[in-house]
Amino acid sequence: MLEYTILNVGNYQLKLHHLVAVAAYLLFVVLLLRVIRLMVFRSTKMDEARKFSMHKLLRYVVWAISVIAILYLLGVNISVLLAGSAALLVGVGLGLQQIFNDFLSGVILLSDGTIKVGDVIEVNDKIYKVQTINYRTTTVIGREENFVILPNSELTCNRVINWTYGGFASRFQIDLSISYGADVEKVMQLLKDIPLAHERILKTPPPFVRLEDFGDSSLKFSLFFYSNEVFRIERIKSSVRVAIFKALAEHGIEIPFPQRVVHIISPPKGG
């Protein structure tokens, strides 16, 4: 019964045992992928982002091999098929060049680990958090809570800043101006104490303050602090600015605003 011919085209015959073999192989592939998933995600030597990348990459490899194996099980002569469709493959390759570029870029992203799921990246002056890395595209979410689909080639061919690469905390800066009549040491100590009270700002390394420059009408200070909350840092900086404004007001320290003095010269009498 397994030798029953289902399809007969020229010299090619599709028999029942071909379909049975393909069905058995597909069942094996499904079970293999489940075993791979369990082994990868139960590993204690990799973080979650690395597990995701490894699982995706292994799926690519298994399905690439499976396509060739299924053609072989169906009795298709792969070498003859490739030779006969060489011109067609060249045309398709030229037309789908960008898609192939995105696909290969996805393999690179998953294999080298420079960008992983959960990373906060900066692309074209926009901040995003990586949600998923797919075959051709990477899904990210912006600070405006909008999902953006980026081609993988855009992440491998352009300049990308990974704010969370290596797991190190990032340093951030808040600039402000203080009037010349203020006590410089008191201002610097006050500014350093404010971030220490914020739960999302790291105590180590500690915040620090620099007197950057002498302005036209004010002293220019910069407050530096470290945080792991890179994606929502603008909210943190806003709350720190509010705390600075309240603390300066309580201590009678003035934030000056630009002033201009205009002298009006009257023309001489009789001129």
Image: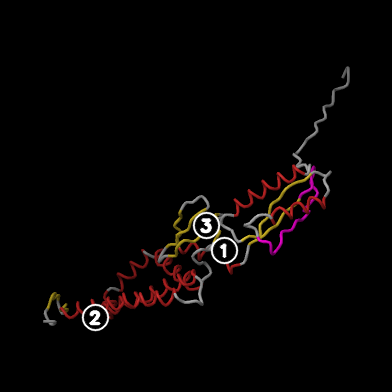
For marks 3 and 1 on the same chain, the one whose residue lies earlier in the sequence = 3
When asked about the image quadrant of residue 263, the answer is: top right
What mark, if any, has residue 128 been given in the picture? 3
Q: Is residue 204 magenta?
A: yes
x 16%, y 77%: residue: 14
Q: Which residues are magenta?
A: 202-220
What mark, if any, has residue 41 been given in the picture? none
Q: Quadrant of the N terminus?
A: bottom left
Q: Is residue 157 left or right of residue 218?
A: left
What mark, if any, has residue 162 been given in the picture? 1
Q: Please tell me which residue lies in front, 38 or 159.
A: 38
User: Total marks drawn?
Assistant: 3
Select label 3 or label 2 by which is in front: 3
x 85%, y 22%: residue: 267
Tell me the distance, in whole angstroms, between the alpha carbons under discs 1 and 2. 45 Å
Answer few, some or many: residues within 10 Å of disc 2's Cα (few below 14, many 20 plus, some between 14 and 19): some
Can you give x and y, in whole percent of width and height, for residue 136 in the image? 41, 64
Q: Amino acid at mark 1?
A: Asn
For marks 1 and 2 on the same chain, the one whose residue lies earlier in the sequence = 2
Query: In the image, is residue 182 above or below residue 54?
Result: above
Q: Please tell me which residue lies in front, 101 or 188.
A: 188
**Which secondary structure, mark 3?**
strand
Q: Amino acid at mark 2?
A: Leu
Q: Is residue 270 left or right of residue 245?
A: right
Which residue, given by chain and number where applicable, does mark 2 sit on? 73
Q: Is residue 191 left or right of residue 34?
A: right
Q: Is residue 137 magenta?
A: no
Q: Please tell me which residue lies in front, 71 or 163.
A: 163
Q: Quadrant of the C terminus?
A: top right
x 57%, y 54%: residue: 232
Q: Is residue 196 left or right of residue 2?
A: right
